[in-house]
Image (cartoon, rainbow, N blue to C red):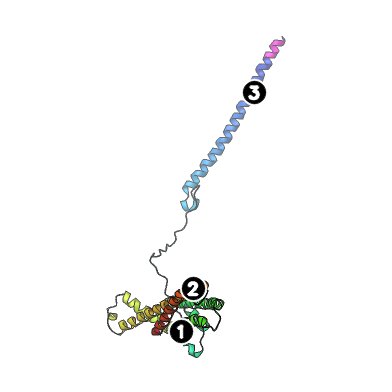
């Protein structure tokens, strides 16, 4: 009898187990079905909305169109014309110094036309002042000040520095007097193909402008040549041990004297 009871209990337990399992499966299935139905309903509502209102999933909302500004590759910066200051004539005989030249030129360094010339003259003048300080120190270490050998090198060196200073003053005066606005206006008229400027007063005036700029470049080149020879002289003084060993120095001195005389023709 005991075995019959055990078999009955076993069968009854299986029935209960499968019943519970079936009910659980039904509950879980119903839950997933409910969630799926809600997602489907939400998706249908979204599809009925306008794209701008719902926004696409996984994508950023549409960005309003903006105006696009296309810049020309060949666009040139607008010319800068320095406001003309009160003309200040610089001259050595009137007591003007290198500091006066640098002060005046500083106001014109941004000018489109004469700005590069103002910068060049200022840099050359600063280089000359630096070279003058070092050159005469080396000269004093090589020869006794006041001796014939000292005078032989000092005299042309002084003349070269004086020529550079005078040229710088002339250039500063021309830079102050140059009509950059008028020059640019005439250049623009030529670029636009204005036939009226090809002949007549305006064409001649533009020619004078160009000649003035060319003369500035010549004077700047003359100052650079003088600086070059002064640099050579400073290097030569380092190796000169006596007045008898000055062959290269003599050639430099002759070239300096020639350049000093030549510079006078540009003023």
Q: Can residue 195 be seen in this view?
A: yes
Q: Residue at x 40, y 81 (%)?
A: 258
- Determine crowd level at label 1: few under 14, some 14-19, many 20+ residues with C-alpha closer than 10 A: many
Q: What element does badge 2 sit on?
A: helix
Specify the segment rendered in magenta. 2-7
What residue is shown with label 1? 166
The numbered mark, 3 or 1, whose residue comes first in the sequence reads: 3
Rendered location of residue 227, percent (x, y) = 46, 76
Residue at the right extreme of this rendering = 2
How many discs appear? 3
Q: Residue at x 50, y 44 (%)?
A: 43
Is 226 located above or below residue 70 in the figure? below
Residue 236 badge: 2
Quarter-of-image position of residue 69: bottom left
Q: Can residue 80 be seen in this view?
A: no
Q: What element does badge 3 sit on?
A: helix
* Labels 3, 1: front one: 1
Rendered location of residue 39, percent (x, y) = 53, 41
- Determine crowd level at label 3: few under 14, some 14-19, many 20+ residues with C-alpha closer than 10 A: few
Residue at the bottom extreme of this rendering = 94
- Determine crowd level at label 2: few under 14, some 14-19, many 20+ residues with C-alpha closer than 10 A: some
Q: Out of 39 and 159, give the one closest to the viewer.
A: 159
Rendered location of residue 234, percent (x, y) = 50, 74
What residue is shown with label 3? 17
The numbered mark, 3 or 2, whose residue comes first in the sequence reads: 3
């Amino acid at each position: 009898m005991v075995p019959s009871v055990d078999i009955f209990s076993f069968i009854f337990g299986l029935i209960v187990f499968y019943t519970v399992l079936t009910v659980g499966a039904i509950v879980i299935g119903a839950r997933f079905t409910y969630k799926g139905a809600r997602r489907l309903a939400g998706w249908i509502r979204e599809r009925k909305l306008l794209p701008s209102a719902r926004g696409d999933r996984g994508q950023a909302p549409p960005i309003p169109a903006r105006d696009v500004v296309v810049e020309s590759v060949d666009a040139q910066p607008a010319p800068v014309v320095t406001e003309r200051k009160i003309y200040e004539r610089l001259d050595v005989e009137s007591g003007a110094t290198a500091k006066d030249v640098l002060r005046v030129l500083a106001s014109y360094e941004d000018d489109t036309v004469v700005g590069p010339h103002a910068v060049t003259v200022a840099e050359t003048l600063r280089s000359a002042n630096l070279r003058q300080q070092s050159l005469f120190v080396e000269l004093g270490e090589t020869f006794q000040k006041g001796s014939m050998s000292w005078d032989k090198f000092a005299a042309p060196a002084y003349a070269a520095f004086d020529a550079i200073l005078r040229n710088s003053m002339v250039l500063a005066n021309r830079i102050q007097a140059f009509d950059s606005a008028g020059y640019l206006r005439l250049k623009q008229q030529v670029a636009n193909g204005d036939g009226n400027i090809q002949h007549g007063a305006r064409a001649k005036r533009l020619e004078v402008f160009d000649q003035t700029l060319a003369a500035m470049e010549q004077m700047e080149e003359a100052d650079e040549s003088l600086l070059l020879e002064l640099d050579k002289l400073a290097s030569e003084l380092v190796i000169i041990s006596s007045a008898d060993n000055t062959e290269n120095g003599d050639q430099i001195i002759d070239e300096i004297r020639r350049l000093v005389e030549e510079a006078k023709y540009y003023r």
